[in-house]
C-alpha cells in the first residue's frame, strides 16, 4: 500500500495540475473574501466586521476551496481515463482496490491542502480588512483555529468523495460538471426548499464543519441548526465510505479498454 | 510447458463475440507475430492476457500464472498497449519515474531505457510536445523498465513514419537476439514478417493459423510468372484449363495454383512461344488474405 501511495503522490508531483488548482482555489477564495469584506456592514448579507458575526462570515467563506478540493479528488481518479493512463496504472498494479484506496487517501491528503489554502486566504483577508477598518478582532483565536481545522478536514473529506465520484463516472469533464452541479446547484436548491435536509448534504456538511454561516460562501439556509462537529465528520466519512465502496465494486468489474 | 498459454478464451461484449474459444500457446524465446485484420480480436486477447479485460470464459496465463498473480511481474512482462496513454503534462523522465514507482522497479533504470530508445536528449521535455513516434519509443522504454523476459506489444508501428518503423524493427530484432519472448500484434504484415519467427493469425475472434513463417509460406498457392509475346492467347488457354491466369500487361501473365513446368508444357502444346516462365516467391500477405477471407 505504501508503494501505491508513493506512486500516486509522484503522479501529482510530476504534473502542474495540483498547483494550478490550488492557485485557482486560493485566487477565487481571496476574491470572494475581499468582496464580502468590502461589502460588510453595507449590505444585508454580511454583517459589519466590527462584530463576531461579520468576521465569521468572511473567515468561513471557504466554499470555493472546498468545491475545488472535491474537483481535485475527481481529477485524481478520472484523469487516468481522460489521459488513458489507467491501462499502465493497472499493468503496474493489477490490484484495482489497492489503486483506488491509494488514490482516495492521496486525494484526501491533497484536499487538506485546498482547505488549508482556503482558510489561510480568508483569515488573512478577513483579519486584514478588520484591522484596516480600525476594528478589534471579535473572534477568539480558538474559534478561528476551529474554523480552519474544519475547513482542512472538510476539504480533505470532500476530495476523498470526489475521488470516488471520479472513479464511478470516469469521464473527467462529466465528473467536474457533476461536482459543481451538485455543490452549487442541487444542494443549494434542495437545502433551500427543505432546509432540514441541508445539514445532511455533503457540501453543506463540509461548509458547516468549516464554520460557515448564512452570510458566507456558501450561504447556509437561515435557521439551520448544524450537526455537531464530530457528527458532521462522521456523516461525511460515512458518505465517502459508501460511495467509495460502490466505486470500488464498479472498478473491479469494469474492463479497461 | 509453453510460456504463454491461452485456453478456450472467449469474450463477449453484449451480443458481439470479440474472441471466440481461442486456444494457443507460445514458447519462450520466440518473436511471435499476432496477426489479423482490424476487429479480429487481437487487442481484446492481449488485454485479457494482461488482466485488463475480464474473459467471459477461458483462461490466459503467463508462465502458468494469471497476470495479476504473476510473481515479480515487472521483471517478467513488459507491455505497450496504448502509446497515447501518457500524461501530456509529464516529462519523459517523469513518466518513467511514475511507471518505475508503480511497478516497483529501480528508478535509476529510467535513464538507461531512455538511452536505449534514443530519447535521452528529450528526457526533460513534456510529452505534449512529442511526436507519435517519440511517444511510441517512450512507451517501449516504460515496458523495458523491468528488463522483462516477455514483451507484449499491441500495434507498436501504428502511426510511425518509415524511419520510426525502421527503428522499431531494429529494436525488435535486438530484443529477439537477446532471447526475449516478444508477442507483437499488427495488421501491417510486412513488418511482422521481417522480425517474427512464428505467426498466430486471428479472424473474427477465432484462431485461423499458428505456425512458423516458413510453414505458413509453404501453404501459399504457387504463383507462376510467364512472359510471352502472345500473352493474351496464352491467358485464354490457361483459363480454359481452369487455371487462374491474370494478364499483368501485354506480355506478362501471373498464374496461380500451377507450376512453371505445367504452364510451359501447355504453351508448347499449342505452339505459344514462352520467353520466361518462373515461380514467384509467395508473400505473407497472400497467405494472410487467403486465410482470413476464407473465414469471412
Image: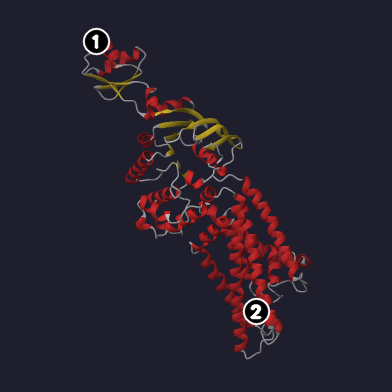
Q: Tell me the element at label 1.
A: helix
Relative placement, left or right, of B174 versus A170 is left
In the rendered image, the quadrant that contains the N terminus of chain A is bottom right
State the separation of the CA atoms marked 2 and 1: 105 Å
Mark 2: few, some, or many residues within 10 Å (few <14, many ≥20)?
many
Residue under label 2, please give it: A58
In the figure, residue A112 lies in which quadrant?
A: bottom right
Q: Nearer the viewer, residue B4 or A145?
A: B4
* Whole-percent x, y for residue B279 in the image: 29, 21
Vertical relation: B39 (above or below) A30: above
The residue located at (42%, 43%) in the rendering is: B156
* Whole-percent x, y for residue B144 in the image: 43, 48
Vertical relation: B283 (above or below) B69: above
In the figure, residue A104 lies in which quadrant?
A: bottom right
* Whole-percent x, y for residue A180 in the image: 62, 63
Q: Nearer the viewer, residue A15 or A102?
A: A102
Residue under label 1, please give it: B268
Amino acid at each position: 500500500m505504501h508503494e501505491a501511495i508513493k506512486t500516486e503522490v509522484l503522479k501529482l508531483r510530476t504534473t502542474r495540475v495540483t498547483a494550478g488548482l490550488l492557485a485557482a482555489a486560493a485566487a477565487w477564495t481571496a476574491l470572494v473574501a475581499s468582496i464580502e469584506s468590502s461589502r460588510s456592514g453595507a449590505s444585508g448579507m454580511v454583517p459589519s466586521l466590527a462584530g463576531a458575526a461579520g468576521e465569521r462570515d468572511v473567515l468561513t467563506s471557504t466554499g470555493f476551496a472546498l468545491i475545488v478540493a472535491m474537483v481535485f479528488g475527481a481529477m485524481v481518479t478520472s484523469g487516468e481515463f481522460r489521459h488513458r493512463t489507467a491501462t499502465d496504472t493497472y499493468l503496474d498494479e493489477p490490484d484495482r482496490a489497492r489503486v483506488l484506496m491509494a488514490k482516495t487517501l492521496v486525494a484526501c491528503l491533497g484536499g487538506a491542502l485546498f482547505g488549508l489554502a482556503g482558510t489561510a486566504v480568508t483569515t488573512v483577508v478577513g483579519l486584514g480588512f478588520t484591522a484596516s477598518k480600525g476594528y478589534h478582532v471579535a473572534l477568539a483565536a480558538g474559534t478561528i483555529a476551529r474554523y480552519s481545522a474544519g475547513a482542512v478536514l472538510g476539504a480533505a473529506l470532500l476530495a476523498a468523495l470526489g475521488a470516488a465520484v471520479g472513479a464511478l463516472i470516469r469521464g473527467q469533464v462529466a465528473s467536474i460538471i457533476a461536482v459543481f452541479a451538485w455543490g452549487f446547484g442541487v444542494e443549494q436548491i434542495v437545502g433551500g426548499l427543505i432546509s432540514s435536509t441541508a445539514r445532511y448534504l455533503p457540501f453543506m456538511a463540509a461548509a458547516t464543519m468549516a464554520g460557515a454561516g448564512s452570510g458566507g460562501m456558501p450561504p447556509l439556509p437561515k435557521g439551520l441548526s448544524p450537526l455537531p462537529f464530530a457528527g458532521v465528520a462522521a456523516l461525511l466519512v460515512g458518505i465517502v465510505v459508501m460511495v467509495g465502496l460502490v466505486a470500488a465494486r464498479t472498478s473491479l468489474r469494469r474492463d479497461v479498454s | 510447458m509453453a510460456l504463454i498459454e491461452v485456453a478456450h478464451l472467449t469474450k463477449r461484449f453484449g451480443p458481439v463475440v470479440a474472441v471466440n474459444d481461442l486456444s494457443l500457446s507460445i514458447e519462450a524465446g520466440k518473436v511471435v507475430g499476432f496477426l489479423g485484420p482490424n476487429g479480429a480480436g487481437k487487442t481484446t486477447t492481449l488485454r485479457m492476457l494482461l488482466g485488463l479485460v475480464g474473459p467471459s470464459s477461458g483462461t490466459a496465463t503467463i508462465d502458468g500464472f494469471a497476470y495479476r498473480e504473476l510473481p515479480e511481474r515487472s521483471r517478467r512482462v513488459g507491455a505497450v498497449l496504448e502509446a497515447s496513454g501518457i500524461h501530456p503534462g509529464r516529462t519523459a523522465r517523469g513518466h518513467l519515474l511514475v511507471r518505475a514507482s508503480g511497478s516497483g522497479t529501480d528508478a535509476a533504470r529510467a535513464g538507461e531505457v531512455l538511452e536505449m530508445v534514443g530519447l535521452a536528449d528529450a528526457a526533460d521535455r513534456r510529452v505534449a510536445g512529442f511526436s507519435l513516434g517519440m511517444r511510441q519509443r517512450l512507451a517501449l522504454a516504460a515496458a523495458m523498465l523491468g528488463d522483462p523476459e516477455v514483451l507484449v506489444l499491441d500495434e507498436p508501428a501504428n502511426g510511425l513514419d518509415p524511419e520510426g518503423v525502421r527503428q522499431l524493427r531494429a529494436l525488435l530484432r535486438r530484443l529477439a537476439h537477446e532471447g526475449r519472448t516478444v508477442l507483437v500484434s499488427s495488421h501491417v504484415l510486412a513488418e511482422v514478417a521481417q522480425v517474427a519467427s512464428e505467426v498466430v493469425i486471428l479472424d473474427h475472434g477465432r484462431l485461423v493459423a499458428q505456425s512458423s513463417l516458413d510453414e505458413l509460406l509453404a501453404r501459399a498457392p504457387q504463383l507462376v510468372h510467364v512472359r510471352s509475346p502472345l500473352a493474351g492467347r496464352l491467358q485464354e488457354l490457361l483459363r480454359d484449363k481452369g487455371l487462374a491466369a491474370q494478364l499483368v500487361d501485354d506480355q506478362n501473365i501471373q498464374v496461380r495454383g500451377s507450376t512453371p513446368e505445367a504452364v510451359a508444357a501447355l504453351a508448347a502444346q499449342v505452339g505459344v512461344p514462352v520467353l520466361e516462365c518462373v515461380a514467384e516467391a509467395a508473400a505473407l500477405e497472400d497467405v494472410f488474405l487467403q486465410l482470413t477471407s476464407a473465414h469471412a
